[in-house]
Image: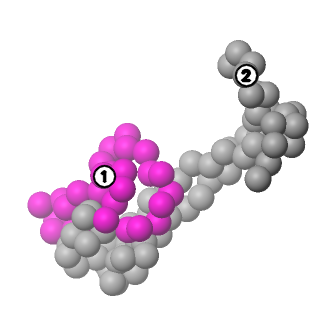
Amino acid sequence: MPTEQDTVGKKKKKYSYKVHLIPKNCKGCGICVEFCAAKILAIDESKGIVKVIPDAKCTGCMLCDLRCPDFAIQIERIPAKETDEAPPGSPA
């Protein structure tokens, strides 16, 4: 387990995540919608397939990707800039 001294001054990588849907593979079963921890997926009633809710943030848990029986979802991890991690107890 890292101590306070181990983490002071180290760079910490942050990531964002993007959900890629493959409409031709989606049958609209809703399994991914039920397992989505961030609740960013919904069934598009007009098309009968899954959609990503606009402006929603994926947490990258990958539960939707892992549970989809038709491989209709892929999660892309996008690296952000490295940020300086503030030492514990210091003002942010």
63 is higher (above) or lower (below) than 54: below
Among the 4 quarters of the image, the one containing residue 91: top right
The residue lying furthest to the left in this view is 46
The nearer-to-camera label among 2 and 1 is 2
Whether residue 51 is in magenta: the answer is yes
Residue positioned 75% across, 19% down in the render: 90
Q: Which residues are magenta?
A: 35-64
Q: Amino acid at mark 1?
A: Lys
Magenta-highlighted stretch: main secondary structure? loop
Residue positioned 36% across, 56% down in the render: 37
Residue ID for mark 2? 89
Distance (Cα) linking label 2 and label 1: 33 Å
- Horizontal side of 36 relative to 58 (left or right) equals left
Which colour assignment does the render follow? one colour
Residue ID for mark 1? 39
* Figure quadrant of the C terminus: top right
Whether residue 47 is in magenta: the answer is yes
- Horizontal side of 68 relative to 80 (left or right) equals left
Among the 4 quarters of the image, the one containing residue 68: bottom left
Circle 2 Cα neighbour tier, 10 Å, few/some/many (<14 / 14–19 / ≥20): few
Residue 35 image point, x, y percent = 31, 65
Circle 1 Cα neighbour tier, 10 Å, few/some/many (<14 / 14–19 / ≥20): some
Badge 2 marks a residue whose secondary structure is: loop
Q: Nearer the viewer, residue 43 or 31?
A: 31
- Horizontal side of 50 relative to 55 (left or right) equals left
Q: Amino acid at mark 2?
A: Gly
Q: Is residue 26 visible?
A: yes
Residue 57 image point, x, y percent = 43, 45
Residue positioned 33% across, 44% down in the render: 54
Among the 4 quarters of the image, the one containing residue 42: bottom left
